[in-house]
Amino acid sequence: MAKATNTELIDLLGQKFGEQLFDVTEPYGLLTFSTTPDQLIEVLTFLKDNGQVNFNFLTDITAVHYPEKNQIAVVYHLHSMVSGIRLRLKVFLPENEPNIPTASMLWNAANWMERETYDFFGVKFEGHPDLRRILNMDELGVFPMLRQYPLEDPNRVDKKDEYFGR
């Protein structure tokens, strides 16, 4: 199959999902769009199983915290080795209740990626076979990548401008 284009992929997705996909952009040529948590698995299944595009490789799952919007975006990067195209899919969740269905039944690699996203952002992947911390200590009571804390301790004396002639 020849390399698919973003326009062909947008048309294909538009026919199947219509208004359930939104915020469609192409930053630096990477097709990016959003969907809702309840449509996520259906969209991912279509992208993986559709013979025209065949997104057979899950590159990454991560998250981004938007404290000014009180939201966490879970971001999926998919790659079709057959069609030679990549895409980014975002799902926005409320910051106080970040629950989303697991994609581990579609790609085995999602298991560890979801555990890492849970560990750092606190996103709970419903239906995950083993959702627990993967890199941080179990006793750690916070999720380190959430922007809830100042970047530096304001009481540090070694960072004062007067020590550096400023």
Image (spheres, rainbow, N blue to C red):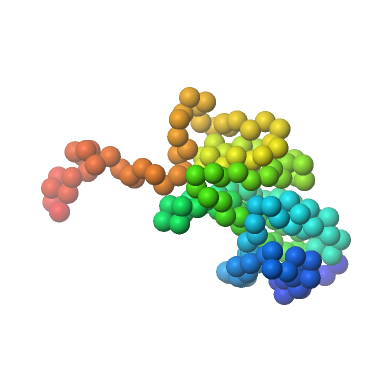
Query: In this rendering, does residue 129 appear at all?
Result: yes
Pick the residue in front: 83 or 102.
102
Pick the residue in front: 127 or 32.
127
User: Extreme top residue here?
Assistant: 139
- Quadrant for residue 53, please give it: bottom right
Residue located 65% across and 57% down the image: 36
Lateral position of residue 95 relative to residue 103, left or right = left
Instruction: Indicate whether 113 appears above or below 12.
Output: above
- Quadrant for residue 128, please give it: top right
Residue 125 in the image: x percent, y percent?
64, 40
Residue located 13% across and 48% down the image: 162
Residue 48 in the image: x percent, y percent?
79, 54
Residue located 58% across and 48% down the image: 62
Residue 26 in the image: x percent, y percent?
61, 70
Pick the residue in front: 158 or 43.
43
Residue located 41% across and 56% down the image: 68
Pick the residue in front: 123 or 57.
123
Instruction: Indicate whether 103 appears above or below 33.
Output: above
The quadrant of the rendering that contains the N terminus is bottom right
Residue 148 in the image: x percent, y percent?
39, 44
The quadrant of the rendering that contains the C terminus is bottom left
Lateral position of residue 40 relative to residue 116, left or right = right
Instruction: Indicate whether 142 appears above or below 62.
Output: above
Query: In this rendering, does residue 88 appear at all?
Result: no
Lateral position of residue 165 relative to residue 31, left or right = left
- Quadrant for residue 156, please give it: top left
Instruction: Indicate whether 64 appears above or below 22.
Output: above
